[in-house]
Amino acid sequence: MSKPYRSAAAEYLTGVAVIFDRFHVMQLVNKSVDKVRRKQQACLEAEGKKTLKGNRFLFLSNYDNLDDSKKDRLNLALEANEPLFIVCIMKKQLRLLWTKPT
């Protein structure tokens, strides 16, 4: 998905469409979510840091695969932090894209 790869593919594979797969796209999304989580955690005071600390896995997981207690923990963290809530909603919407037939 890097620019050099796309450029080389365009140069040597003319007429071929380059398609990005779900795994690599979601990997980039998860890196972005984690970047926002780290930034938000750095900005919070001691009490707020407790809300995010130890929950990295929850933000990077598929919400539908979490058990109820983990969903509750994630929901509490998202209620307390609007930027993380927004990126998690965007991540979920992007995941829905992969379920569409066209």
Image (cartoon, rainbow, N blue to C red):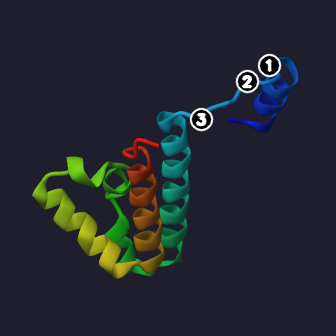
Residue 93 image offset from top left, x and y in percent: 42, 59
Q: Is residue 47 left or right of residue 31?
A: left
Q: Are marks 2 and 3 in contact (CB under 8 Å)?
A: no
Q: Which residue is mark 1?
A: 13
Q: Are marks 1 and 2 in contact (CB under 8 Å)?
A: yes
Residue 91 image offset from top left, x and y in percent: 44, 57
In this rendering, the answer to whether 56 lies above or below 9 is below
Q: Which residue is mark 2?
A: 16
Identify the secondary structure beneath mark 1: loop
Q: Residue at x 55, y 67 (%)?
A: 39
Residue 86 image offset from top left, x and y in percent: 45, 72
In the displayed orientation, state which residue is furthest to the front: 102
In the displayed orientation, state which residue is furthest to the top: 12
Residue 22 image offset from top left, x and y in percent: 48, 37
Marker count (numbered): 3
Mark carried by residue 86: none
Q: Nearer the viewer, residue 47 or 17?
A: 17
Q: Residues within 10 Å of mark 2 (few under 14, many from 20)?
A: few
Q: Which residue is mark 3?
A: 20
Identify the secondary structure beneath mark 2: loop
Q: Earlier in the sequence, mark 3 or mark 1?
A: 1
Kind of residue at badge 2:
Val
Q: Nearer the viewer, residue 88 or 35?
A: 88
Q: Quadrant of residue 25?
A: top right
How far apart are the alpha carbons under marks 1 and 2? 6 Å
Q: Nearer the viewer, residue 93 or 37?
A: 93
Q: Residues within 10 Å of mark 3 (few under 14, many from 20)?
A: few
Q: Residues within 10 Å of mark 1 (few under 14, many from 20)?
A: few
Kind of residue at badge 1:
Leu
Q: Is residue 53 left or right of residue 72?
A: right
Q: Is residue 52 left or right of residue 40?
A: left
